[in-house]
Image (tube, coloured by chain):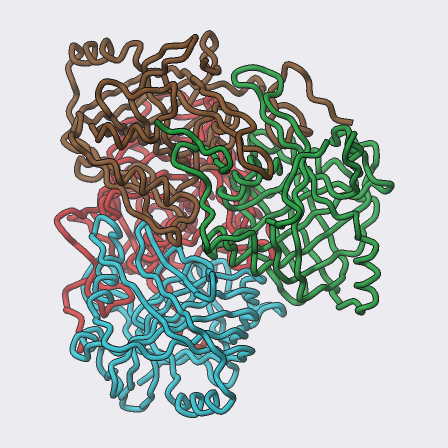
Chain colours: A brown, B green, C cyan, D red
Amino acid sequence: MFTPLANSSYQMPAHFGPRYQGAKTSGWYHDVTTMIVSYVTDRELLSRYIPAPFELAETAVVSVAYARNRNVDWLAGHGYNLIAVNAAVNFKGQRDQLAGNYCLVMWENLADPILTGRELQGIPKIYADISDLDIHEGRWRAEASHFGHPIVDLEVAELSTPSAEDIALFQAAQQDKDHPMAWRYLPNVGAGGEALSEFTLFPSQNQLSEIQVGSGQVNWQSLSWEQNPTQFHIVNALAGLPVLDYLPAITTRGSCNLIVADSPSRVLR
Amino acid sequence: MFTPLANSSYQMPAHFGPRYQGAKTSGWYHDVTTMIVSYVTDRELLSRYIPAPFELAETAVVSVAYARNRNVDWLAGHGYNLIAVNAAVNFKGQRDQLAGNYCLVMWENLADPILTGRELQGIPKIYADISDLDIHEGRWRAEASHFGHPIVDLEVAELSTPSAEDIALFQAAQQDKDHPMAWRYLPNVGAGGEALSEFTLFPSQNQLSEIQVGSGQVNWQSLSWEQNPTQFHIVNALAGLPVLDYLPAITTRGSCNLIVADSPSRVLR
Amino acid sequence: MFTPLANSSYQMPAHFGPRYQGAKTSGWYHDVTTMIVSYVTDRELLSRYIPAPFELAETAVVSVAYARNRNVDWLAGHGYNLIAVNAAVNFKGQRDQLAGNYCLVMWENLADPILTGRELQGIPKIYADISDLDIHEGRWRAEASHFGHPIVDLEVAELSTPSAEDIALFQAAQQDKDHPMAWRYLPNVGAGGEALSEFTLFPSQNQLSEIQVGSGQVNWQSLSWEQNPTQFHIVNALAGLPVLDYLPAITTRGSCNLIVADSPSRVLR
Amino acid sequence: MFTPLANSSYQMPAHFGPRYQGAKTSGWYHDVTTMIVSYVTDRELLSRYIPAPFELAETAVVSVAYARNRNVDWLAGHGYNLIAVNAAVNFKGQRDQLAGNYCLVMWENLADPILTGRELQGIPKIYADISDLDIHEGRWRAEASHFGHPIVDLEVAELSTPSAEDIALFQAAQQDKDHPMAWRYLPNVGAGGEALSEFTLFPSQNQLSEIQVGSGQVNWQSLSWEQNPTQFHIVNALAGLPVLDYLPAITTRGSCNLIVADSPSRVLR
């Protein structure tokens, strides 16, 4: 009979053994290109999607981040694209007080990291077809669709390289405000109510070889249940958040490590 | 701030509201075509993948079931394909004693039902590209692959329609042995050990318009980590189960309801 | 050195031998489900897309036909979906005078029949992601998109089965008006002008097991070059044809043979 | 009525107007990464696939080239992957005598450039699912499959940067031997024999930012008609060419222009 080992990490189906952790795997994504468009939105509207003890940051900021991930170690070199939507928040727990980003939703175009992210870290990942980054005449563009219906497209243009000074200032401002957080939630089987509910922190580590700054734009679709029966309420909620003011958009190239040895993912309290 | 309602069913992201349960949704899959190939295998080998208090049935039988699901109500009429691998078992719990099928793994070619099945019912669904049913010169064929590498193909041929008597006998033999069961498992965040572990029952209801019987065949691939880094251990485990004797293969056409009002999914004890 | 055989049919790459014509292949598509929505449009606008010696039929009718093709012999049982757009025309050649449909464009979701159709018969096939037929609450729906941007969706509802009499009347009215025609065109290499230009007829043969009549609807998108750089001009041209009056929509189930022995595809003159 | 303009370039469907040639298009592919594995093979076997007046070069060399094309101007910034198989040849025509590569087949994972390449230049492009370049622990890998069945995978490892001297030597050796050529062929409609048959040259222009040299490997599958009914004869022919000796493998990064103003695609004679 199958019995799981106490110290190993399993995912369904658990009975075929623990997750593969061979010599060739790591948390490194060796080729990551990102495009991040952020904007100030309506505080009251955004706060409707924020569970306590999260609170919105001083300014109600939504950021939409596209990433093209390639040369991913745990996928044997394969990759995938994602579009994440975050809200700037403070976590005000009994033990933990942290400033950072609460993940509202993350679309990815590969099921494997969706399952891992949801179940190991509580990141609310769902599926979409997501374009590779398209660069044409200096404009960076990406878009997501599902069931043949567009969800969102984003674009960054007028890119320029900031001075080393500006980068240092920016990174100083970001310091201690960069904690990615989410809500791992599982319902009861065949009934209402929660079987599991906990807030999570999943630190990562970036090594950037290029940073640019420009002006960005995000266009959300409004969808009917017929057009996207599993996600229309998510897309419509995001489409309902007004863009009051765009912040400078950012693009980066570099590497990213999702398994930071001395700072593993953990439950917040 | 967002607060979930006590009696509603949520999935990540929970903060955008409960799962849609409108007038247009139901558990019905209105157009389902299946092909099921079963075989006797080595008892000792198969039992390695069966957690207590499941026990293998008297005969160690693996069944590989392909389904082409179309006109699915909760997907607004969309559909998907699946290949499920089950073991014939008895659940010998303190409260529940049931004969049925323990789901070893289920591949599906659409992420939406993968998430729902894993999180609401513990069905160990994972992603694969799965062909539509191909029928050529009386042979029914289907196959699954992921990352461009084949996983399994199955085929049924020499199909004939059984007599009404034979169908009645078959259904009588199946009675009370048809419980689909699985293991809902979630690991701790950032650590070994389980955050949630429970066995589940998820009854469904079939209305068949056609049943045929024939001879079937299943071919499993052996895969390296490089070829399928997230599933190779599952495929290799299944490829390692010898086919000692094929049972008659079955094909069906009809409808299926996954939400049976008076017999909802539940946790086994 | 490679030399093609005089009486065999080759496609690029020709040097690997003629198209496979084994015992297992035929022109039969054994499982074809269609949905056809037709409408009267503006005569002057439609005629802009009709090359002489085609002329529009008495009434300027566009028909949009969706087909889900399965169990296709030449594809070893595989299948694909298509959306064809036709104009009702008369071909007034020196030798041939025929009433039928001039194919304006045909989207398919598999490259293999696109190449065959274009090069062997001149059917102007291009690629799109095309949904499987979705049936939900009596509505049949299908849609096409490319590069993540919708092209067209069509829907048929209020379906009912016509009387045998009505079917006979309809088929009588169709007789000798059902010739599918197209324009095989190839440009010069590296220069303007035509290397090959000829009009074609490609008869097929249908065996229908079900016919229904209902009311249909077609929605064309308007697209920018950025959204669909290879097809936007086609989609916009079709979107610019007003729907003056919908004709009864038709759905069918049955089989179709694309290689009619005594009536092969041929060039019109 | 529609009439094509004499100096414009049309593709089917021609009646919607000429190919788009706006201010935003060009022949440039701004982000191209390639991996080329070449090997000496059996002269007699390879020559079976070479039509006169092509002749094999002094050494019978097959090269398998993978390219990841991104930021493609004529695709509005979209991209695609390809795997091309070439034979080293001399074209010995009445007018033209050229050393270069005869394209045996080119797989691409996007239909749009397949149609353009076949019809405008005679490049024998066909469809396959082609992985993005996977780089893992210094190994570059790519693979193609169709209908769920692998076609070929290639790998390059032990990469190092050659000296500027070596690059100069290599480029000198390549000079005047780098002509890409193919065979544009169209059969008659509904009959054997050729409607169009001509050999083509399609020059391109590369700007490389990185060149590396390593050791490569190519693995061809053997396929049945059932596994890949439209391409099995091509794959099996290539699998039948023995690898007698691998030449140094090459990887590059850079840009590529397919429309060279003073050296357009043309027909060879």
Residue D34's image quarter? top left
A231 left or right of B47? left
Residue C115's image quarter? bottom left
| Residue B251, horizontal then vertical, whole percent | 70, 59
- Residue name at image x 84 percent, y 61 percent: B169
Of residues B154 and D227, the one nearer the viewer is B154
- Residue name at image x 53 percent, y 57 percent: B70
Of residues A86 and B152, the one nearer the viewer is A86
**Quadrant location of the C terminus of chain A?**
top left
| Residue B92, horizontal then vertical, whole percent | 80, 33
- Residue name at image x 75 percent, y 32 percent: B50
From this viewpoint, is residue C188 visible?
no
Looking at this view, name the residue that lies furthest to the front. B6
- Residue name at image x 52 percent, y 82 percent: C261
| Residue D128, horizontal then vertical, whole percent | 46, 49
**Quadrant location of the N terminus of chain A?**
top right
A44 left or right of D104? left
Of residues A141 and D184, the one nearer the viewer is A141
Is C199 located above or below residue B184 in the figure?
below
Of residues C43 and C30, the one nearer the viewer is C43
| Residue C186, horizontal then vertical, whole percent | 29, 67
Is C143 located above or below residue B50 in the figure?
below
From this viewpoint, is residue C155 visible?
yes
Looking at this view, name the residue that lies furthest to the right. B58
Residue A4's image quarter? top right
